[in-house]
Image (tube, rainbow, N blue to C red):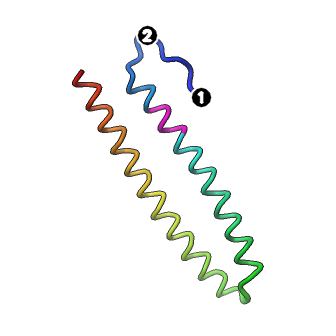
Amino acid sequence: MTQAPDKTEPRWAELSDDVLESLEAGRKRGIEAVRTFVDEVTSVVEGESRRKSVIDAALKLAEELVTTRIEFMRGVVRSAGEATSKQ
């Protein structure tokens, strides 16, 4: 986890570190999920072009989900920054 914040470091900086750690953990889980999916599709779906179509569609979906998560996290960080700067 992150180190205890320095007395001069604002609380939002600590929140930003936590969000970045969460994003990194999510990225690693996402990569592992894609690997598992590709392995399962490869063993079940016959034909290389058909596998490629299924995998491409899954990767497009994953990309959209990741983009949505990043946009959500940016909004959370922005809101937290605004809230702490008002105090």
Image quadrant holding the C terminus, namely top left
Q: Position of residue 44 (x, y in %)?
A: 74, 82
Please tell me whether residue 55 belongs to the stretch shown in magenta: no
In space, the residues marked 1 and 2 are separated at their CA atoms by 18 Å
Q: How many marks?
A: 2
Please tell me whether residue 17 belongs to the stretch shown in magenta: yes
Q: Residues within 10 Å of mark 2 (few under 14, many from 20)?
A: few
Magenta span: predominant SS is helix
Q: Is residue 40 left or right of residue 70?
A: right
Q: Amino acid at mark 1?
A: Met
Q: Which residues are magenta?
A: 16-21
Helix, strand or loop at mark 2: loop
Q: Evaluate if marks 1 and 2 touch, with contact meaning CB atoms under 8 Å apart.
A: no
Q: Quadrant of residue 10?
A: top left
* Residue ID at (43%, 30%): 15
Q: Is residue 65 left or right of residue 82?
A: right
Q: Residues within 10 Å of mark 1 (few under 14, many from 20)?
A: few
- Counting residues from the start of the chain, the first of labels 1 and 2 encountered is 1
Q: Quadrant of residue 3?
A: top right
Image quadrant holding the N terminus, namely top right
Q: Is residue 19 above or below residue 36?
A: above
Residue labelled with disc 1: 1
Q: Is residue 20 left or right of residue 36?
A: left
Residue labelled with disc 2: 7
Q: Which mark is residue 17?
A: none
* Residue ID at (58%, 51%): 27
Helix, strand or loop at mark 1: loop
Q: Amino acid at mark 2?
A: Lys
Q: Is residue 70 above or below residue 35?
A: above
